[in-house]
Image: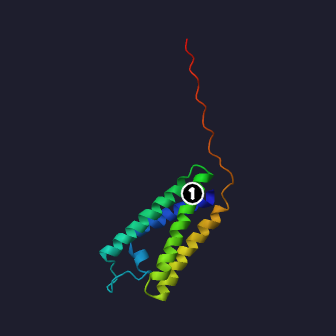
Amino acid sequence: MLLARFLGAVTIAFSVAIIARPRLMADPSGHTAPNGRVPHDVRLLMYAIGVRDMALGALMLGAPNPPAMRAALAARVASDLGDLVVFGTRLPRPGQRLKVGTAAGGWAAVCAWSLRRIPAGATTPEPRRARRLRRR
């Protein structure tokens, strides 16, 4: 699960970068103004994407067992595939669609591939049996 945890840490780091500097994501997708600034509404979208990905990265980093890690990775893959479909088909310019779609698809592929490295079988702890209290 080390690879998946590493991907979670990288996801968190990139999310922090996007939140701190929305232009990192707004520029490649063509969402900057002609003067190079990021408009307020676009900034809000970048913050939302950053927070979403930060939460997914935290789940990947802190998953306590293989089933939880598989669920966290599946959520990450689903969100990246969503980004691929939306940004990869709806951005105005072909170059933007290719650039952003490739990045989203690449992350989806790497995270999906890392699912194969998660040990099989549920390793959640067995529930403890309740102790019977003896009445004296």
The relative height of residue 90 versus residue 122 in the rendered view (above or below) is below
Determine crowd level at label 1: few under 14, some 14-19, many 20+ residues with C-alpha closer than 10 A. Answer: some
Residue that extends furthest to the top in the rendered view of this protein:
136
Q: Position of residue 104 (x, y in %)?
A: 53, 74
Q: Position of residue 135 (x, y in %)?
A: 55, 14
Q: Residue at x 44, y 63 (%)?
A: 52
Residue that extends furthest to the right in the rendered view of this protein:
120
Q: How many marks?
A: 1
Q: Position of residue 68 (x, y in %)?
A: 57, 53
Q: Residue at x 54, y 61 (%)?
A: 8
Can residue 16 be seen at all in this image of the molecule?
Answer: no
User: Which element carries disc 1, helix, strand or loop?
Assistant: helix
The relative height of residue 64 versus residue 74 in the rendered view (above or below) is above
Dot 1 amino acid type: Ala
The relative height of residue 8 versus residue 63 in the rendered view (above or below) is below
Residue 79 as seen in the image, left or right of residue 2: left
Can residue 79 be seen at all in this image of the molecule?
Answer: yes
Q: Residue at x 51, y 60 (%)?
A: 57
Residue at label 1?
A: 71
